[in-house]
Image (cartoon, rainbow, N blue to C red):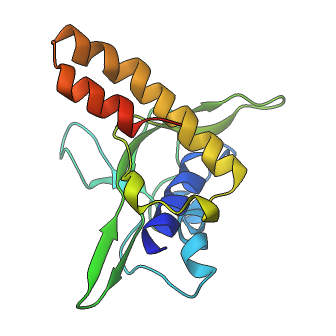
């Protein structure tokens, strides 16, 4: 359940559509909500900027209150988690690009996840996911198949290709 709720938070933030000039701290709670619903939380930041100067943890992009507003072209991590002292820890970390969302009116923003790595299917309780979260997950898996699959085939990595196909089934 903990893994699924962390994944739900990851998905909810990743698929969020928000107005320009929105600070990361304003939307950060979307990554925590599924945990908060059952009285859980995590004690670390939800994400940080990624750039070419410091590589990771590049300020001022991120989800803390002192970060700048999110803008198209920024890279950030989205990394909710949950840790139970002395038992286990979970962190799902994706890299995302802030992009313009396809909206009817004014341009809004959203995230495009660029890490393209499947989630651990054995740890996902599908009964907890909403239909929208499942649709997002299936679309994400289609993207992974379309972008990574041909490269694995080009390199003749057949075992890896079969693994990718199994782990990105709808």
In the image, farthest residue toward the right: 105
Position of 152 relative to 101 (above/below):
above
Residue 23's image quarter? bottom right
Residue 140: x and y in percent read: 50, 35
Classify residue 121 as left or right of residue 10.
left
Q: Quadrant of the C terminus?
A: top right
Identify the residue shown where x is 62% and y is 65%. 128
Classify residue 42 as left or right of residue 135.
left
Classify residue 27 as left or right of residue 98.
right
In the image, farthest residue toward the top: 154
Residue 91's image quarter? bottom left
Identify the residue shown where x is 19% and y is 26%. 159
Position of 166 relative to 17 (above/below):
above
- Whether residue 21 is visible here, answered yes or no, is no
Q: Nearer the viewer, residue 125 or 105?
A: 125
- Whether residue 122 is visible here, answered yes or no, is yes
Identify the residue shown where x is 58% and y is 80%. 36
Residue 82: x and y in percent read: 39, 76
Position of 76 relative to 109 (above/below):
below
Residue 86's image quarter? bottom left
Classify residue 71 as left or right of residue 101.
left
Identify the residue shown where x is 45% and y is 32%. 73
Residue 13: x and y in percent read: 56, 54
Number of numbered discs on residues: 0
Q: Nearer the viewer, residue 116 or 167?
A: 167
Residue 75: x and y in percent read: 39, 40
Q: Nearer the viewer, residue 85 or 26?
A: 85
């Amino acid at each position: 359940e903990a893994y699924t709720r962390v994944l739900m938070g990851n998905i909810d933030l990743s698929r969020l559509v928000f107005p320009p000039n929105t600070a990361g701290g304003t939307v950060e709670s979307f990554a925590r909500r599924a945990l908060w619903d059952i009285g859980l939380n995590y004690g670390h930041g939800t994400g940080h900027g990624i750039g070419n100067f410091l590589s990771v943890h590049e300020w001022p992009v991120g989800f803390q209150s002192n970060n700048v507003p999110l803008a198209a072209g920024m890279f950030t991590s989205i990394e909710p988690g949950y840790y139970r002292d002395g038992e286990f820890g979970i962190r799902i970390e994706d890299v995302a690009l802030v992009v313009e969302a396809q909206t009817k009116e004014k341009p809004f923003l959203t995230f495009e996840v660029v890490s393209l790595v499947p989630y651990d299917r054995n740890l996902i309780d599908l009964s907890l996911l909403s239909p929208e979260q499942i649709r997002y997950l299936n679309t994400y898996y289609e993207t992974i198949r379309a972008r990574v699959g041909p490269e694995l085939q080009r390199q003749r990595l057949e075992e890896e290709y079969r693994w990718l196909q199994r782990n990105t089934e709808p």
